[in-house]
């Protein structure tokens, strides 16, 4: 009751007609300065710095899918010239091989994709290759999620968080190769 | 219903503007909350590459940007490739390590968003990444635009 009384009194005394104008001015300021677009990008986690006396654990050649992007932005897949559009299928084949084809990985949890670039490689080419590899993983996660009875991978993320059954089975093992010392 | 409205109009004889500030304030608060003010002027050209496999960074507070690209000169000319963090161009890349290390202490969940020009060479990015590894800031995000096909 006391509140209503007070309001009535204020309405009587201070002119509030300009209030809207003031608020509009502020509104226009924030409208102009707002950037609504969300930052998007390809997330990666860099490998931690190697200790001087520790050598990285040996990895079987067979489990690594080597992708080399050269100076002209051309792709060498396991030392064979390839097109960027072929990478996705190759990565899927490599990761889900489970030891069937001796040219590909032994097991899904051992499979690794290594991307190597030259110093002169254009950034654009590198991102395209990285994108294809990630898309391959996204596709595998999607089909794995469907196998587990979810509609898509985003559904299982919503249900179980980022550490879910799909991610535990198929880890995104993408390695950015150490630059050559030479 | 219509009679109800008529009645109101007769008594007041004009459109009530009392709620106008409230409506505007609501809009204002919405935009204030969603606004991120542009803090830096970018001194290098960053034409971002396109990609499909995108992740969103929802928490902008965790992000530090590193810009890599050719320097913007006067008369729309572009110069050599430069690296910029916050407002400053980095002359000596080994400074990246100390800058990022300090930022990591302030914000342990730091994400480094690399905004690199399409035409930049990988060499400089590799050098920056080596510095990031030295600093211990391992979460990076290659900033890309959505591929519209």
Image (cartoon, coloured by chain):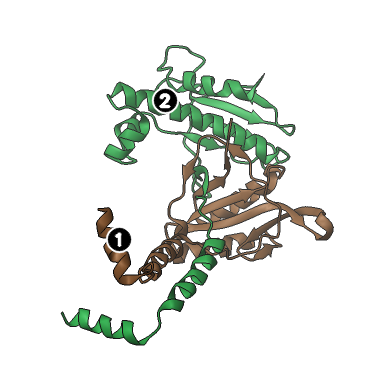
The chain assigned the colour green in the figure is A
The chain assigned the colour brown in the figure is B
* Residue A117 in view of the camera: no
Q: Position of residue B145 (x, y in %)?
A: 58, 42
Q: Where, by quadrant of the figure, is residue A162 drawn?
A: top left
Query: Callout 1: residue from which chain?
Result: B
Give the crowd class for mark 1: few <14, some 14-19, many >=20 residues within 10 Å.
Answer: few
User: Mark 2 sits on what residue?
Assistant: A140
Q: Is residue B105 above or below residue B70?
A: below
Q: Nearer the viewer, residue B104 or B6?
A: B6
**What is the residue that sits farthest to the bottom in this orientation?**
A13
**What is the residue that sits farthest to the left in this orientation?**
A1
Q: Is residue A117 above or below residue A82?
A: below
Side of A63 relative to B85 (left or right): left
Q: Nearer the viewer, residue A138 or B7?
A: B7
Judged from the image, the secondary structure of the residue bearing numbered disc 2 is helix
Q: Which mark is residue B6?
A: 1
Q: Position of residue B36 (x, y in %)?
A: 50, 62
Q: Are marks 2 and 1 on the same chain?
A: no
Q: Position of residue A73 (x, y in %)?
A: 70, 32
Report the residue at 59% width, 20% height from top: A86
Q: Where, by quadrant of the figure, is residue A121 drawn?
A: top right
Report the residue at 52% width, 50% height from top: A37
- Spatial distance from mark 2 to mark 1, Cα to Cα? 64 Å
Q: Which mark is residue B58?
A: none
Query: Callout 2: residue from which chain?
Result: A
Q: Is residue A91 above or below residue A10?
A: above
């Amino acid at each position: 009751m006391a509140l209503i009384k007070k309001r009535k009194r204020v309405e009587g005394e201070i002119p509030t007609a300009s209030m809207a104008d003031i608020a509009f001015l502020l509104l226009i300021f924030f409208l102009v300065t707002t950037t609504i677009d969300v930052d998007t990008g390809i997330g990666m986690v860099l490998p931690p710095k190697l200790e001087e006396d520790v050598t990285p654990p040996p990895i079987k050649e067979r489990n690594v899918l080597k992708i080399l992007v050269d100076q002209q932005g051309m792709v060498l897949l396991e030392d064979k010239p390839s097109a960027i559009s072929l990478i996705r299928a190759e990565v899927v084949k490599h990761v889900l091989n489970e030891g069937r084809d001796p040219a590909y990985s032994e097991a899904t949890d051992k499979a690794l994709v290594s991307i190597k670039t030259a110093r002169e490689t254009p950034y654009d080419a590198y991102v395209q290759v990285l994108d294809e590899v990630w898309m391959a993983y996204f596709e595998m996660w999607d089909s794995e999620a469907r196998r587990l009875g979810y509609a898509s991978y985003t559904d299982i993320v919503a249900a179980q968080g980022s550490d879910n059954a799909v991610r535990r089975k198929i880890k995104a093992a993408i390695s950015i190769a150490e630059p050559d010392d030479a | 219903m219509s009679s109800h409205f008529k009645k109101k109009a007769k008594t007041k004889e004009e459109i009530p503007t009392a709620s106008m500030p409230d409506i505007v304030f609501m809009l204002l608060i919405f935009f204030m909350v969603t606004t991120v003010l542009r803090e830096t002027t970018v001194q290098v050209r960053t034409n971002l590459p396109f990609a499909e496999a995108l992740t969103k960074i929802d928490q902008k507070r965790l992000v530090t940007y590193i810009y890599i690209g050719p320097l913007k000169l006067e008369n729309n000319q572009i110069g050599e490739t430069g690296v910029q963090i916050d407002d400053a161009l980095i002359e000596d890349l080994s400074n990246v390590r100390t800058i990022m290390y300090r930022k990591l202490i302030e914000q342990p969940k730091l994400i480094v968003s690399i905004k690199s020009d399409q035409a930049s060479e990988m060499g400089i990015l590799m050098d920056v990444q080596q510095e990031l590894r030295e600093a211990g800031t391992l979460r990076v995000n290659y900033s890309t635009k959505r591929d519209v096909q």
